[in-house]
Amino acid sequence: MKSFSRSERVNEQIRRELADLIRSGLKDPRIARQMMLVTLTDVEVTPDYAHAKVFYTSLSTEDQRASVDQTLKAAAGFLRRELGRRIRIHHIPELHFHYDTSVERGTHLAHLIDEAVKSDNPGQELPVAAEADRSEAPVKRSDGSLGDE
C-alpha cells in the first residue's frame, strides 16, 4: 500500500524546489533580502496540475507583508519557468501565492486557552499543562525513604 499519493509527492517536490529557488535563485539583492524572511508552508496542486496554491509565512511586519506578497506574485512567472527546468511533470502549474494565517491563528488560540486557564485558576501560577507534567511518583529522600516531596 502506498503511503503517499503522487499528488502529495508532487506538492512536496514543488514546495522544496520553490523554497530553493526563492532562497538562491532571485538575483536582485533587495528581493533576496526580503525573501529570506519567507517560509513556504504548503503547496496544493489541482488534480489537472494547471494551478498550484503556494502558502507561505513571513517574519516581516504587516506593512511589509503586502510588499512580500507583491514580490512573490511578480516573480511567479520566473519561478514557474525555473521550476519547469528542475522537475519533470507533464504540465508545470501556474503559481498562486497565499499568505498562510494558520500559524497566527494557532498562536491566537493558544493565547485564548492560556487566558481561560488563568481566569479559571486566578491564584495559581503554573499553567495546567505544567502541572500535568509533574509525576505523581513518590520522591526518594536523601535517607533512602520514599516521600511526597
Image: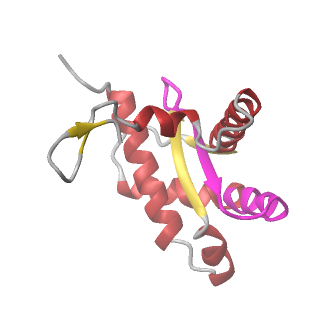
Extreme-front residue of the structure: 143
- Decide if residue 84 is on the left or right side of residue 38: left
Name of the residue lying farthest toward the left: 144
Q: Left or right of 17: which side holds 122?
A: right
User: Is 122 located above or below residue 19 in the figure?
Assistant: above
Quadrant holding the C terminus = top left
Residue 59 percent across, percent down from the top left = 66, 62
* Residue situated in front as seen by the camera: 84 or 65: 65
In the image, residue 48 above or below residue 118: above
Choose between 50 and 21: the one closer to the eye.
Answer: 21
Q: Is residue 102 above or below residue 3?
A: below
How many numbered marks are there? Answer: 0
User: Residue 46 location, x and y as percent?
Assistant: 53, 27
- Where is residue 63 shown, x and y percent of the image? 85, 62
- Is residue 90 shown to the viewer in this render? no
Determine the image quadrant of residue 101: top right
**As drawn, which residue projects farthest toward the top?**
1
Please check the rendered image and state whether residue 29 is part of the magenta-colored stretch, yes or no.
no
Residue at left offset 53%, top offset 65%:
22
Residue 47 painted magenta: yes
Q: Residue at x 68, y 31 (%)?
A: 117
Tell me the quarter of the picture where residue 62 sits.
bottom right
Residue farthest to the bottom, as pictured? 29
Q: Which residues are magenta?
A: 45-72
